[in-house]
Amino acid sequence: MTETERVVRIFHESWDLRDPDRGAAVIAEDCQFEDVAREELQPGPEAYKNDYYRWREAFPYGECKVVNVIVQDDWAVVEFVNRGTHTGPLETSRGTFAPTGRKVKVRYCSVMRVAEGKVVEGRDYYDSAGIIQQLGLVGD
């Protein structure tokens, strides 16, 4: 396994381990990470932890399963699936959504660059409209 793959796996597997500090430890202080669906920048490890806690509050028993990791040099593409039941408030750019009790399954793709053992930039791509639909927050 390359260093790039090792780092991106630590980042993603920290969710199932319920260990945001483990994930934050592989994020550079000056990392520029973007949640493309929300058009939101998440700079550095503290932003990662804030996002972790936001999702963990909404989906406390959620899981993240890495499906595929493709590495070329210092870049990695990570395909993964998140599953969970919406049992806590979900904070979004469109407001806070009360728990629905509904299950969601969402496919994601992260594109990340690693340097000196840390994620220095990246982007998450996912179907935010699919999340809203699965939660019953809009019509089918």
Image (cartoon, helix red, strand yellow):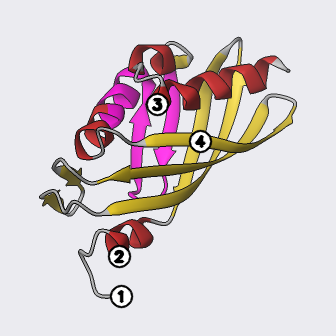
Residue at the spot of label 4: 65
Kind of residue sitting beneath label 2: Gln
Label whose residue precedes the other's in the sequence (4 or 3): 3
Instruction: Label 3, secondary structure: give it.
Output: helix
Residue with the mark numbered 1: 140
Q: Is residue 124 left or right of residue 86?
A: right
Q: Residues within 10 Å of mark 3 (few under 14, many from 20)?
A: many
- At 16% from the left edge and 57% from the top edge, which residue is drawn? 99
Q: Which residue is mark 2?
A: 133
Question: Quick one: 107 or 110, which is closer to the camera?
Answer: 107
Task: Using the numbered discs, state the Cα–Cα distance from disc 2 to disc 1 in whole angstroms.
Answer: 6 Å
N-term mark: 2 or 4: 4
Residue receiving disc 3: 15
From the top left corner, tell me how far across and down residue 8 is, in percent: 66, 28
The answer to whether marks 4 and 3 mark residues whose Cβ atoms lie closer than 8 Å is: no
Quick check: is 9 in the magenta stretch? no
Say if residue 29 shows up in the picture.
no
Q: Please report the residue visible at 43 percent of the width from the left and 71 percent of the height from the top.
A: 130
Q: Are marks 3 and 2 in contact (CB under 8 Å)?
A: no
Splitting the image into 4 quarters, where does residue 111 fall? Answer: top right
Q: Residues within 10 Å of mark 2 (few under 14, many from 20)?
A: few
Answer yes or no: do the residues labelled 2 and 1 have beta carbons within 8 Å?
A: yes
Q: What range of the chain is rendered magenta?
A: 29-52
